[in-house]
Amino acid sequence: MSEKSSRIVKGTSIVVLGLVSVAVSAITLQYYVSNVTVDNAVINGHSVRLASPVDGQIKKFYVQPGVAVRSGEVLARIATAPLLINASSESAATLASSLQEQKNIADLRASVDGDKAQLDAAQKAIVAFQGRLKHVDEQYKSVKATNTLVLSDVVKQQQAALRVEQTEEAKARREYARYQGLVLQGAIPRQVADQARSTWEASVAKVQQARASLSQSLTNLHASGPEEVIGSNYLLREDRAQLLQSMEEKMVLSALLKARVDANTISLRQAQAAYVRDQAFYQDSHRIYQASQKLSQQNQNHDLQASFDGIVYQTQHEQGEQVKSSEPLVTLVDCNDVWLEKVVGADQASTIDTHAPVDVQLTGFSSTLVGKVDLISPMTGIQTTNERSTGVRVQALDTFIPPNLVGMPLARVTVRLTQPPVQLKSEKFCGLGQTAKLAFARKKLF
């Protein structure tokens, strides 16, 4: 291949690469202009607390948190009278149960301590982010003050320059008028007067230029505001956006850790209480055995069954505990009724096209899923799920409000997947608490 042909090929390659780069940039810009994208949307769902059908003792727990169950499946068995067992075997069983509970207590305590350490680290990170955010905001104010001071000095300098040019112009105008009179008297040639006129016209042009410069500086001074300051300092703007995103992620993590610490703390207290009871039960097993013989004919078992297909989310009691009728025993999550939700500003929610499909990128999933807007509803405050009645379907997780939106008009946006992936149901608790990135189509202006 000749040198000329080689140059042509290289030139053509550069042009093609340039066109491809321009096309990719145009497509990316079009995507962000036509879409509303939010991070840290959370998978939520409905849960139901199932209660004991009778007063009695929990004879058997057949499920643990995270286990999938079918509608009608027996979750626990409650006996209305103490179980009949041999005194010695009962003592041995109680001792074995106590040893197991000791292990459970140690595991729960380690889990609580670990989660508390992570929660403390997350809260410290939030405080650090807040301090850095305050520092960035102070930098914004400093940049604005500096810009205003510099522009004010420029205006003063140009005002002084305008006055100088105006003085020079007046002087040149008087000189030209004097020379015109001398020409009429025949005292000087007209060329001298023409030269004076040129000097005066040059002075007029300088005055006009000084006025234009002063006008532009005044416009710049009056236009300098917080938006212009931020826009003129890309690094500060990007740092602030990154800080807000990081702080939001830590807030989500903190909320999840706090919920887990609270749940495990309750389980730990229940395990400790059960251990104390088992110790006393171990000492009194023979007396309990004798009393149970008198009630042997009255002993009946009652099963607690799942009311729908789902996942066991929590168990509120331990095997062997005494429970009252209608007292909650098991909380189920309906894996067929889950959604993604995100709290956004009301202004941002108003730009979402509710009829268009939603691109969903679940954390840990490589492929992009398709969803649809289920509901956009206004919010007046933080919604909690602490108070729950048995048998009532309620949302499993509290609705989380990002800290940068507190005090603003808010809207809660829920999205349902058109075809939920099969592997999502295999996730623990059906993916509850898992985060995702959502891309909504933006409403067309016309």
Image (cartoon, rainbow, N blue to C red):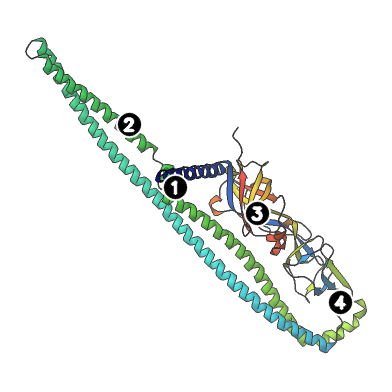
Query: Image quarter for residue 252?
Result: bottom right
Which residue appears at 72% of the width and 52% of the height? Answer: 419
Q: Position of residue 236 (x, y in %)?
A: 42, 51
Q: Amino acid at mark 2?
A: Ser
Which residue appears at 68% of the width and 60% of the height? Answer: 431
Q: Amino acid at mark 4?
A: Ala
- Residue 293's place in the image compared with 40, above or below, is below
- What's the CA distance linking mark 1 and mark 3? 73 Å
Q: Position of residue 1 (x, y in %)?
A: 44, 47
> In the rendered image, which residue does mark 3 sit on?
383
User: Element at badge 2?
Assistant: helix
> In the rendered image, which residue does mark 4 sit on?
81
Mark 4 or mark 2: which comes first in sequence?
Answer: 4
- Residue 111's place in the image compared with 88, above or below, is above
Q: Amino acid at mark 1?
A: Met
Q: Are marks 3 and 2 in contact (CB under 8 Å)?
A: no
Q: Are marks 3 and 4 in contact (CB under 8 Å)?
A: no
- What's the CA distance linking mark 4 and mark 1? 98 Å
Mark 4 or mark 1: which comes first in sequence?
Answer: 1
Which residue appears at 71% of the width and 56% of the height? Answer: 421
Query: Image quarter for residue 187?
Result: top left
> In the rendered image, which residue does mark 2 sit on?
215
Frontmost residue, 39 versus 119: 39
> In the rendered image, which residue does mark 1 sit on?
1
